[in-house]
């Protein structure tokens, strides 16, 4: 299990996953933390010691407590285990109460500087400690109400302070990941109760019929009462879905078939924030050839490959057939039924990404039309190794800043980490001295809306009005009374309408938009172009909604993802997960953007020439506009 991966010869970290997302697939962070708090460490210590000893850990009273690269005084009563084989240390500390734990937590937090993965604030973090003069270390720290847990593995190399590593260094990081996940698995063995063992990884076990039915019915029920966008699928009869799919779930011949059935059911809802995520054990059975497919206009084109295919598969070749079927027929049969998407342009992007995906042990046969109008047939492995891409992947950064002449350019690539606000505030002086500003959100898939708002408040001197939202409300007594209301009556009072709406599963709690004051410190008003595209989603779209009235902002690029809201996370049997969108956001004036995407003021979709030449025509257009208007 690897969290930091690279496909280039020179290793780079491309937005690595959070260790907690991968931890013992099926035991999500919150449930794990809750269950940890239900168990007294003293009562499970013997079992924990036995399990840890089996993988090389020894209790060590004298080992220093190190957070990142900083040594702290170890609290009295804390437990420390060290694995002499691989250097991993486990620190476990149970305080008297939650308040005491909260007071101790900042002591741990202040020693963290460079993150990879998500920062969960008080819940936890997964990060590499990168300092030019100190050895790199991999760390996972989290707080469980009154328990603090710290996992650390020192690495042998000193980084340059950036997320760039040699192939050997990257292997060492990946190996450390595996070592730490193994420890977390053992912690889950001890702290997770028997009733929740259904959510543990499959480990080769076949789900029983009862387990499959439980997972399906639980998902179906939560959708029925909490899904926010049934009106966008008006022809979907959700009760009939239950009737139609129960036999399929009962008769599923394998774990994979079961999860594909769940994905097919979920896809009927046409929502990008409502998804089924199959267990990592099953996901690892799939692979892709070393080929990147991109949708341009109404066709799919090959826009990157392993360098070994440079002559066989020229970049810019059009994909014609897959496994003997035309591309559209193959997608219609094998791909589209399982895609959860709110918008057609995102569905097309996912189809392009998935079109060559399949069992890792199988090859895929393709037919292409080269730029020279030559038809070629090839068979490609879905299990490539040591891929070296023709077009190199750029290292992922949370944000970046540079000056283009007297124009400030800032990329904000995620709102999933509060560190993005600190980084942006660090750019403010340089932005202030510029004539214009470009904000690039094209890689920003979302995170916390408040991170975006805390950046936006530096860019306007007027109050910021956020999106308004609503969520379905279930009042059983209202639903019972609603059965006796004549919906055709012309004399319905407000109470009658409320209970009737509840009876029809259409009763909502509505919240007006929030108002956020501009920053009391630095506010900058410059001509600003915001670059957006298909990958601009969720919290990044919330940012755009709040920025809509700002008159010195212009958006440019392509339609956004068209999906946001608050997902409800469900665990599924065997280690899978589901999420269901429970919150419906709109512009303050009620305009919808979920299901459509936000259209830029200046539409400028990416072209195949942009991809193949590395030219960023949208950025060039923004620079030209700002230069000519100043």
Image (cartoon, rainbow, N blue to C red):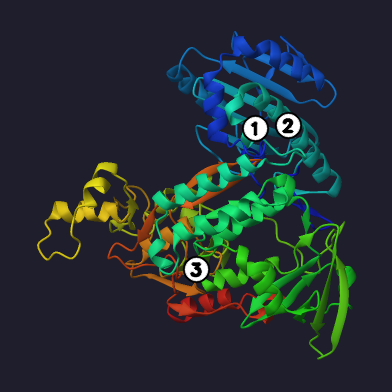
User: Which image quarter: residue 293?
Assistant: bottom right
Q: Residue furthest bottom?
A: 373
Q: Which residue is mark 1?
A: 140
Q: Secondary structure at mark 3?
A: loop
Label located before the other in sequence (2 or 1) = 1
Is there CB contact under 8 Å for labels 1 and 3? no
Horizontal side of 362 relative to 144 (left or right) equals: right
The location of residue 44, given as percent across then percent down, is 64, 13
The location of residue 529, given as percent across then percent down, is 46, 70
Q: Which residue is mark 2?
A: 180
* Structural crowding at the residue carrying mark 3, measured as other residues with C-alpha within 10 Å and reported as few (<14), some (14–19) or many (≥20): many
Q: Residue furthest left?
A: 491
Report, in whole angstroms, how far the alpha carbon at label 1 lies from the one at label 3.
Answer: 34 Å
**Placement of 163 over or under 445, stated as above or below:** above
Q: Secondary structure at mark 2?
A: helix
Asked whether residue 3 appears in the rendered view, the answer is: no
Horizontal side of 53 relative to 297 (left or right) equals: right
Asked whether residue 186 appears in the rendered view, the answer is: yes
Report, in whole angstroms, how far the alpha carbon at label 3 lies from the one at label 2.
Answer: 37 Å
The residue at the point 58 percent across, 28 percent down is 195
Q: Report the quarter where the N terminus lies.
A: top right
* Structural crowding at the residue carrying mark 2, measured as other residues with C-alpha within 10 Å and reported as few (<14), some (14–19) or many (≥20): many
Q: Which residue is mark 3?
A: 560
**Placement of 358 over or under 453, stated as above or below:** below
Is there CB contact under 8 Å for labels 2 and 1? yes
Label located before the other in sequence (3 or 2) = 2
**Placement of 324 over or under 159, stated as above or below:** below
The front one of 505 and 589 is 505
């Amino acid at each position: 299990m690897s969290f930091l991966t690279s496909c280039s010869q020179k290793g780079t970290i491309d937005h690595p996953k959070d260790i907690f997302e991968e931890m013992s697939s099926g035991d999500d962070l919150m449930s794990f933390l809750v269950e940890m708090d239900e168990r007294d460490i003293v009562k499970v210590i013997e079992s924990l010691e036995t399990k840890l000893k089996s993988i090389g850990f020894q209790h060590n009273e004298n080992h220093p407590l190190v957070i990142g690269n900083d040594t702290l005084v170890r609290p009295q009563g804390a437990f420390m285990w060290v694995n002499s084989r691989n250097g991993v240390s486990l620190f476990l500390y149970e305080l008297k109460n939650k308040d005491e734990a909260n007071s101790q937590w900042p002591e741990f937090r202040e020693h963290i500087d460079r993150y990879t993965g998500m920062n969960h604030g008080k819940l936890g973090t997964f990060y590499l400690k990168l300092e030019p003069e100190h050895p790199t270390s991999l760390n996972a720290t989290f707080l469980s109400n009154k328990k603090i847990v710290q996992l650390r593995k020192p690495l042998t190399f000193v980084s340059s302070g950036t997320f760039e590593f040699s192939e050997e260094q990257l292997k060492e990081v990946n190996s450390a990941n595996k070592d730490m996940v193994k420890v977390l698995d053992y912690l889950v063995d001890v702290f997770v109760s028997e009733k929740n063992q259904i959510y543990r990884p499959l480990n080769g076990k076949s789900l029983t019929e009862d387990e499959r039915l439980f997972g399906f019915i639980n998902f179906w029920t939560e959708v029925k009462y909490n899904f926010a966008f049934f009106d966008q699928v008006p022809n979907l009869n959700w009760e009939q879905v239950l009737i139609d799919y129960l036999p399929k779930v009962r008769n599923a011949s394998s774990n994979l078939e079961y999860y594909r059935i769940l994905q097919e059911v979920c896809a009927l809802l046409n929502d990008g924030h409502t998804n089924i995520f199959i267990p990592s054990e099953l996901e690892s059975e799939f692979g892709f050839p070393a080929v990147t497919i991109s949708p341009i206009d109404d066709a799919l084109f090959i826009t990157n490959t392993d360098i070994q295919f440079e002559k066989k598969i020229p970049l810019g070749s059009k994909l014609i057939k897959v496994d003997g079927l035309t591309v559209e027929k193959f997608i219609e049969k094998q791909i589209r039924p399982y895609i959860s998407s709110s918008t057609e342009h995102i569905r097309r992007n996912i189809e392009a990404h998935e079109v060559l995906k399949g069992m890792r042990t199988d090859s895929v046969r393709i037919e292409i039309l080269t730029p020279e109008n030559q038809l070629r047939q090839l068979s490609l492995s879905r299990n490539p190794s040591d891929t070296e891409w023709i077009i190199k992947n750029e290292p992922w950064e949370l944000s970046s800043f540079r000056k283009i002449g007297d124009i400030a350019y800032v990329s904000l690539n995620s709102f999933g980490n509060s560190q993005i606000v600190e980084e942006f505030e660090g750019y403010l002086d340089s932005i202030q001295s510029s004539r214009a500003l470009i904000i690039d959100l094209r890689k920003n898939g979302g995170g916390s809306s408040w991170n975006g708002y805390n950046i936006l408040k530096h860019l306007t001197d007027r109050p910021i009005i956020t999106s308004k939202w609503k969520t379905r409300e279930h009042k059983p007594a209202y639903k019972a009374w609603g059965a006796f209301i004549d919906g055709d009556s012309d004399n319905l009072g407000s109470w009658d309408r409320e209970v009737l709406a509840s009876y029809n599963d259409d009763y909502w709690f509505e919240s007006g938009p929030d108002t956020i004051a501009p920053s009391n410190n630095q506010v900058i008003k410059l001509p600003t172009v915001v670059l957006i595209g298909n990958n601009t989603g969720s919290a990044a779209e919330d940012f755009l909604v709040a920025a809509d009235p700002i008159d010195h902002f212009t958006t440019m690029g392509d339609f956004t993802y068209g999906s946001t809201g608050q997902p409800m996370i469900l665990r599924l049997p065997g280690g899978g997960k589901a999420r269901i969108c429970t919150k419906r956001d709109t512009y303050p004036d009620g305009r919808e953007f979920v299901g459509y995407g936000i259209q830029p003021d200046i539409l400028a979709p990416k072209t195949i020439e942009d991809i193949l030449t590395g030219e960023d025509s949208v950025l060039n257009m923004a620079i030209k506009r700002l230069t000519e208007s100043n």
